[in-house]
Image: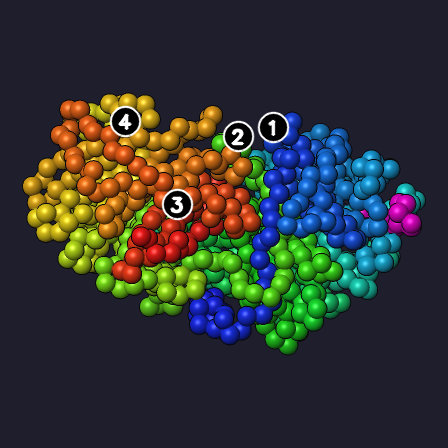
Amino acid sequence: MHTKRLLPALLATLMVSTTPIMAAEVFNRISSFPVAQNNEAAEATSSEIIVASEDGNTLVYSDSPAGGIGFVDITDPKAPKPLGFLSLDGEPTSVTIIGAKAYVGVNTSESKANPSGKLAVVDIASKTVDTTIDLGGQPDSTAHNEAGTLVAIAIENERDEDLNDGVIPQMPAGYVVIVSVKDGVVDPASVKKVDVTGLAAIAPEDPEPEFVDFNGNDEIALTLQENNHIVIIDGKTGTVTANFPAGSVSLEGVDTKKDGALKFTGKMEDVPREPDAVHWIDNDRFAIANEGDWKGGSRGFSIFKKDGTLLWDSGTQLDDTAAQLGHYPDARNKKGVEPEGLEVAKFGDTTYIFVTEERSSLVAVYKDNGPDAAPEYIQSLPSGISPEGIVAIPSRNLIATANEADLRGDGLIGSHVMVYELAEGEAAFPQIISDMDEKGRPIGWAALSALVGDAEKPGILYAVSDSVLSAQPSIYTIDANATPARITHKTVVTRGGDAAQKLDLEGIALDGKGGFWLASEGNSDKLVPHALYHVDADGKILAEVPFPAELLANEIRFGTEGITAVGSGDDMTLWIAIQREWKDDPKGQVKLLAYKPASKEWGAVRYQLDAPSEGAWVGLSEITAHGDYAYIIERDNQIGEKAQLKKLYRVKLADLVPAKLGGELPVVAKEEFHDILADLKAGSGYVVDKVEGFGIDANGVGYLVTDNDGVDDSSGETYFWSIGEVK
């Protein structure tokens, strides 16, 4: 298990030191498609299970909240186009394609106690339903055999999680349906109902079938998730040929508490795997994604032989890697990264295993090395929020993910389909990754909200984390000389020897003595003060400077969003950017505060914001002094296609002449320096909203970083990049 835990760290080292030499084929995202384009009238729309047409030019995905399936044209995979939506009078749960037809499992249940469902056969070209077959229960997964002559449907008849705390058994029992297909026509008389009760030790009368997949011998692998069991079925006869428990795992070095801190020191004993997706690797081996939906938390994936022999388990690898990438979901960490979907496909001579991680919003890519060796971790891919389905299109060197979360109702991003291409080159993701600590565990990080460059060491910068990690406010040392940039050290900010509480760090500046000035965005409703903190190199708070009463009389929760130091010693002035207008500010103007540590004097100027687009607000995210200017990030709060303003402006330091608080404040002139929006669009994903850090290193090179909100209602993707020398 020790070597398994070190694998992500080893890979990170390889990525840094050998990528230019070993540059071969890697997967990179080439496009993103907002699925709302297919159904603009729907209040909520989602992409869940996704498949591709046999020519690889059309994607079809199930859309449960909208009640149908969507179609995407990827003839040009770098520019997906909407092909429309088909309503299916129910809740589509899965889809598979044979020839010109899509076979869709549709849940039509009145209730969980009275389940029903159908198999809808859809003509892809005309987007019409040819026929339907009553399945007698609530379908979940569907799959077809290689010859295209059989379709299997897992009839889950899922439990009600609100009934008796979700404890099973909850009748009626689920089963598997197998139907025959000839020339695109389903034969209703061929329907076989496969009874899988009485097999598992856990609630054998209620098997809870979850996912099905065929191998080349027409054998079906079936997962019984809540029963923690696996069943092998002869697809031609409907006979159960083998069944065995999925087993359990014991894990060391995992984060087990939702506490605003990333501490990979916990243990979990005998956790049931509770697999969701299953996919054959060859005719004898298959992989399972261990979601742990009920009593789980196994947070990995496993490889079994069809006789029940466990060949390999990932242990903590997926969690470790997500932590190094800043994608560990502390806010939802009961099940860790929560592996859910799987795909296995051969590209050229290489067989890849793809694992979608719902809570970390990543896709882990492994290379299969055969039955006698462990699979090899290759890379992780950034996906949209909550990836579930994934499909490989080896004939076109493509894969596509379906990312189910639709957060548009909260002003956030909607569901996306994302397309990736295998090609020669270097991995575009990650742009920043952490090392392992002195104990061999990941340096967990998230929500980087400010940057400052080291005064003497080129390429070395420091960042802070915001309130997402409220129980572990930290300063991160970043080595941007490496590719990707590396977080080499984490310094926890302390008060009285313990991690400091009631901080929301949004700014960092050098104090000129080896320590830092930190700015905390206050929120009186949560008893978090608007304040500045002086800390030493070890993170110990030396002094706390609260905002003066004349400022706090007009406070709102949108406070400090950056701090920078101008001058040194007794001549040092700290300039602090306030994100939005406070109650005493004219509309469209915000304060740049000035504080002199030597005299403890406060002052301010005003900064004119650009006008927001309809429904948006505009504010500041960072301030950094360099040369004759203070550089300021100004952005709107919009995401994706709605994002209009992400810019770097600058103000002459000579114009920063603070006036006394409470009186008339001068308005400083600004000039545009860099359009950040163009940078964010270059990643082929959607435009993220929170560009929150700008630092300039000892050689005058500027770096930008985004805040990933700790993967909470966010894809977790962090952009970290250089804009070159700042002149």
Residue 300 to residue 505: above or below? below
Q: Nearer the viewer, mark 4 or mark 3?
A: 3
Tell me which label, 2 or 1, sits earlier in the chain.
Answer: 1
Name the residue at 73% across, 67% down: 282
Measured in 3D between alpha carbons, the distance from the residue under mark 2 to the one under mark 1, in whole angstroms, is 8 Å
Q: Nearer the viewer, residue 649 or 423?
A: 649
Measured in 3D between alpha carbons, the distance from the residue under mark 2 to the one under mark 3, in whole angstroms, is 31 Å
Which element type, helix, strand or loop, lies under badge 4? loop
Q: Label 1 belongs to which residue?
A: 43
Magenta span main SS? strand
Q: Which residues are magenta?
A: 175-186
Which element type, helix, strand or loop, lies under badge 2? helix
Q: Is residue 182 magenta?
A: yes
Q: Label 4 belongs to which residue?
A: 582
Name the residue at 53% across, 33% down: 408
Measured in 3D between alpha carbons, the distance from the residue under mark 2 to the one under mark 4, in whole angstroms, is 27 Å
Which element type, helix, strand or loop, lies under badge 3? strand
**Which residue type does callout 3 highlight?**
His
Tell me which label, 1 or 3, sits earlier in the chain.
Answer: 1
Q: Nearer the viewer, residue 321 or 126?
A: 126
Q: Label 3 belongs to which residue?
A: 674
**Which residue type does callout 2 highlight?**
Gly
Tell me which label, 4 or 3, sits earlier in the chain.
Answer: 4
